[in-house]
Image (cartoon, rainbow, N blue to C red):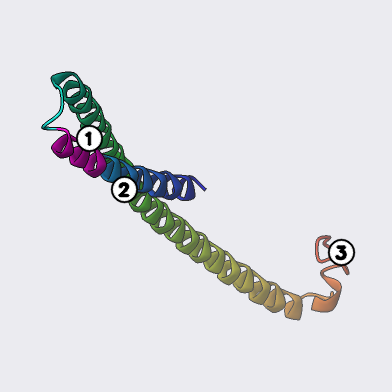
């Protein structure tokens, strides 16, 4: 779920970046168009341009940070998938060993039941948990 949030944040940062680039281009166009006008208007446009440049730089940093976090999340997700695969393989091996051990015990009980008076079918109850004598 966190991966989807970072992807959404990255998409939003990218759209903000695009919007700021458009504002920057517009402000630059205004600056060039007002070069012949008064210095007051020019100073205001220059300030606006600097503000837009600052916002654009902040958006770039935010976008790069979101991209970096997204990559880290992807890597950690891949790592956790590998860990869970290892745990599953270990569990499967343990289960297989336990099954073989139980099968061996059953075979031993069958051998013992051949030599005793109680038939093997009567050794275990219907539930397979109680031992009858």
Q: Residue at x 11, y 32 (%)?
A: 35
> Which quadrant of the figure has residue 115?
bottom right
- Residue on which the image places disc 1: 57
Q: Position of residue 14 (x, y in %)?
A: 34, 48
Asked if one can make out residue 90 in the rendered structure from this viewpoint, the answer is: yes
Q: Which residues are magenta?
A: 24-34
Front residue (pair 99, 4): 4
Q: Position of residue 51 (x, y in %)?
A: 25, 27
What secondary structure is found at the residue carrying circle 2? helix
Q: Position of residue 26 (x, y in %)?
A: 25, 42
Q: Is residue 85 above or below residue 12?
A: below
Q: In the image, which disc is placed on residue 133?
A: none
Front residue (pair 105, 80): 80
- Residue on which the image places disc 2: 18
Spatial separation of the CA atoms under disc 2 and disc 1: 12 Å
Q: Position of residue 72 (x, y in %)?
A: 32, 46
Q: Is residue 51 above or below residue 12?
A: above
Q: Is residue 83 left or right of residue 120?
A: left
- Residue on which the image places disc 3: 132
Q: Residue at x 52, y 66 (%)?
A: 97
Q: Residue at x 46, y 56 (%)?
A: 84
What secondary structure is found at the residue carrying circle 3? loop
Mark 2 vs mark 1: in front: 2
């Amino acid at each position: 779920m966190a991966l989807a949030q970072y992807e959404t944040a990255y998409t939003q940062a990218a759209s903000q970046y695009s919007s700021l680039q458009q504002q920057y281009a517009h402000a630059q166009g205004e600056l060039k168009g007002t070069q012949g006008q008064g210095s007051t208007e020019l100073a205001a446009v220059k300030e606006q341009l600097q503000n837009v440049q600052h916002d654009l730089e902040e958006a770039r940093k935010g976008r790069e940070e979101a991209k970096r976090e997204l990559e880290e999340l992807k890597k950690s997700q891949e790592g956790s998938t590998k860990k869970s695969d290892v745990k599953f393989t270990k569990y499967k091996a343990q289960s297989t060993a336990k099954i073989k051990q139980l099968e061996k015990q059953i075979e031993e009980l069958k051998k013992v039941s051949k030599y005793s008076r109680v038939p093997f079918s009567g050794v275990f109850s219907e539930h397979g948990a109680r031992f009858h004598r």
